Each structure stands twice: as structure tokens, then as C-alpha cells.
């Protein structure tokens, strides 16, 4: 019997014959996604600009900072190395005498000697400076000074070269004869035995050395009270303060025949030149100008003779002491004299020497006079 199509009329009897879908589980709504946090308040990213060379601009800036640092370091090294180099090329001499010497004393006392050595001068320069030629032997000393530095005022004391003293082994004679007879050692011994002052350092400069150093600093100021015409010293000066080059400063330091007091006036002119030179050496231009700084050191190295025990520090202290002695508050004097015969006044000279030995230069007072004669 053909099957009748199912029209659903008997569903109440047989039920729904369609496969029923399994009951679906209740749907739980998905949690809402969290709200996005607001972005932090950051500056917008910067894009590093490319440099033509592709290098790091920060590194280039650091190099610009390093350049002045390197330059300053090189300059300081130059200031230190040049004096040490000059010291190594400076002539040295054993100036310490044998035998008994004064014991160590407070402060430091240098013996400054200006010799008539023409070392380093050509024949043309000897003619230009009117120095003549070397006479052989140890030569002579036109300048003899003591520089004392310590707790009191710095003291620069001139010893006239014609001073009559006892020279060991040669009797009573002029003090500069000690240098001619026995060089630096005998001169140091003579000074020590006649003064009781221990010499801690020896510094000698020749004619050429003075010219070189004065020219290196650009000249010095001298102030002659009267006009000077001295062919023997190659000198022709007007009265009054004026700039002097090396040759003129040398002649001014050597001249004595035009003065009524001869050597007594000359030692004052020598201190004047040395004081002015020390002042120029201390000026900023002598340090900041590399060419001048190098010329000063080369000039000094080529013309100085120093004791074996003199160090670079000693030379610096020596230069500072010269400047202090010739400056305000310093003492620049001549050994106390009896009269123009340049014989020492034993009482006044002895008192001055004792003050130096004790490093009590502040007590010298009126014992210090420019010409060595008693204060009026």
C-alpha cells in the first residue's frame, strides 16, 4: 500500500518524528574587553638627524670639550718641561769648598757672581759690547752679591769687588782676587770665612748671559740720575728712566769710571738692573708668551753656571728672592763700609752678618743702606 504522505495530522498520537536537536546550554554573555588605558603623556619620539659623516653628534660635542682641556694640559707640561730641560743643559761647577765650613743656618743664602766671562760672545759682539777679550785663567768677578731668603724680608747684599779681605792662602787682598786665584770654590770659602755666613747655592752669569736674558724679556728699565758717557763700557746714556736692551744693561752694570764713588755707585746700578730683570721675569708675559718663555730659558741655560747642588726649585726660589729683595718690603744694601775706600766697617758689618746667620733680616734696620755708609 503506498505510503501516504505525512501531513502531521496524527502527530498528537505518534508524536513528532523529527529528530529533535539537543537542548542548547544557556549562553553566557562574554565579558566586555577592558577599556584601553589612556596613553601616557610622553613627548613625541624624536628622530635623530643624520650627520653628513654618519657619526654621533654627542661624540663630536665631547671632542670639542676635550680640545681645550688637552691644550691646557699641553701648556702646563710645556711650562714644566722647559725649565727642567734648560737645567740639564746649564753648566755646573763644584763650588763647595773643602775643609771647615759654617754649620747649616736657617733660611737660604745664595752667592751671585757676575763674571767677566765672554763665553758665548762672538768677536763682533765683544767689540759691540766693549768687553774686550778673555784674559785667560778664571777671569774676574765684576759682581759679588749675597741673596738671603727666609722668614724675614728678602735681602740682596752687594759686596764691592775691591773690598779688602783675607783670602785663604793669599793673605789680605781684594775679594775678587779669590775668584781669579781659585775659581768658585775659593770665592765661596773667602766669603764664608770673612762673614760667617754659609753659602747654600752658587749662581754665576757671564757678560753674554746678561745680554741674552735681558733681550729675551724685552729689555729692562734703568734710571741713571745723571747722563753717562763711558767708552770703556760702550755706554752713552741720558739722565732719567729709560728702557735698556741687553747691551746697554751690560754697560750700565759695568760702568764705574764716570762715578765719583766708583765701585760703590756701580754696585747700586747692578742691583737696579737685576731688580728690573727679576720683575720682568715674573711678569705674566714671560710665562704666557711661549716664544719669550723659551728664549728666557734658553738664554739662561746657555750663560749660567750653577753649583752642583742647585736644583730647579732652588733657581725658582732664587728668582723670586731677587724680585722680593728689590720690591716693596725687601732689603737691597751694600756691605757696611767705613768710607769710600770700600773697607768694611767691622762693627756694623758684623752686626748685619749675625742677623743674616740667624735669619733675622727684619732686624737689620738702618744697617742696610744703598752705598754701605752709615745712614744720615
Image (spheres, rainbow, N blue to C red):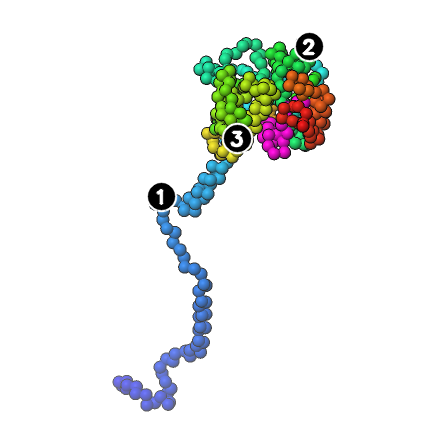
Query: Which mark is first along the chain, 3 or 1?
Result: 1
**Magenta stretch contains residue 333:** yes
Q: How many marks?
A: 3
- Give residue 308's position: percent from left, percent from top: 61, 20
Q: Residues within 10 Å of mark 3 (few under 14, many from 20)?
A: many
Pick the front one: 201 or 232: 232
Q: Quadrant of residue 6?
A: bottom left
- Asked whether 348 falls inside the magenta stretch, the response is no
Q: Which residue is mark 1?
A: 53
Mark 3 element type: helix
Q: Which residue is mark 2?
A: 171
Q: Earlier in the sequence, mark 1 or mark 2?
A: 1
Query: Disc 3 designates what residue?
Result: 280
State the CA–CA distance, disc 1 to disc 2.
84 Å
Q: Earlier in the sequence, mark 3 or mark 2?
A: 2
User: What crowding class fits label 1: few (fewer than 14 Cα within 10 Å), some (14-19), or many (20 or more)?
Assistant: few
Amino acid at each position: 500500500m503506498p505510503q501516504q504522505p505525512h501531513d502531521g495530522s496524527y502527530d498528537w498520537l505518534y508524536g513528532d518524528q523529527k529528530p529533535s536537536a539537543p537542548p542548547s546550554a544557556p549562553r553566557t554573555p562574554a565579558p566586555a574587553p577592558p577599556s584601553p588605558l589612556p596613553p601616557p603623556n610622553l613627548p613625541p619620539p624624536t628622530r635623530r638627524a643624520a650627520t653628513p659623516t654618519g657619526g654621533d653628534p654627542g661624540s663630536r660635542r665631547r671632542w670639542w670639550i676635550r680640545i681645550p682641556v688637552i691644550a691646557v694640559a699641553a701648556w702646563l707640561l710645556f711650562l714644566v718641561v722647559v725649565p727642567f730641560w734648560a737645567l740639564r743643559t746649564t753648566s755646573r761647577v763644584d763650588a763647595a769648598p773643602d775643609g771647615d765650613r759654617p754649620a747649616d743656618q736657617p733660611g737660604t743664602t745664595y752667592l751671585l757672581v757676575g763674571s767677566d766671562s765672554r763665553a758665548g760672545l762672538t768677536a763682533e759682539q765683544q767689540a759691540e759690547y766693549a768687553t774686550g777679550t778673555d784674559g785667560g785663567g778664571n777671569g774676574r768677578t765684576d759682581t759679588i752679591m749675597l741673596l738671603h731668603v727666609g722668614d724675614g724680608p728678602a735681602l740682596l747684599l752687594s759686596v764691592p769687588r775691591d773690598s779688602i779681605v783675607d783670602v785663604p792662602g793669599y793673605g789680605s787682598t781684594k775679594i775678587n782676587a779669590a775668584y781669579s786665584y781659585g775659581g768658585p770654590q775659593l770665592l765661596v770659602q773667602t766669603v764664608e770665612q770673612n762673614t760667617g755666613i754659609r753659602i747654600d747655592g752658587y749662581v754665576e752669569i757671564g757678560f753674554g748671559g746678561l745680554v741674552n736674558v735681558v733681550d729675551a724679556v724685552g729689555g729692562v728699565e734703568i734710571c741713571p740720575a745723571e747722563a753717562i758717557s763711558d767708552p770703556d763700557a760702550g755706554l752713552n746714556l741720558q739722565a732719567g728712566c729709560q728702557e735698556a736692551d741687553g747691551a746697554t744693561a751690560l754697560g750700565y752694570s759695568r760702568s764705574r769710571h764716570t762715578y765719583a764713588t766708583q765701585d760703590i755707585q756701580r754696585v747700586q746700578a747692578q742691583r737696579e738692573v737685576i731688580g728690573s730683570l727679576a720683575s720682568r721675569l715674573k711678569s705674566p708675559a714671560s710665562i704666557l708668551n711661549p716664544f719669550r718663555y723659551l728664549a728666557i730659558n734658553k738664554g739662561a741655560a746657555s750663560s749660567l753656571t750653577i753649583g752642583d747642588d742647585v736644583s730647579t726649585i732652588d733657581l725658582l726660589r732664587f728668582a723670586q728672592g731677587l724680585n722680593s729683595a728689590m720690591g716693596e718690603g725687601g732689603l737691597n744694601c751694600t756691605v757696611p763700609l767705613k768710607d769710600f775706600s770700600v773697607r768694611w766697617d767691622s762693627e756694623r758689618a758684623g752686626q748685619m752678618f749675625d742677623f743674616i746667620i740667624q735669619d733675622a733680616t727684619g732686624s737689620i734696620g738702618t744697617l742696610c743702606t744703598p752705598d754701605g755708609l752709615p745712614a744720615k
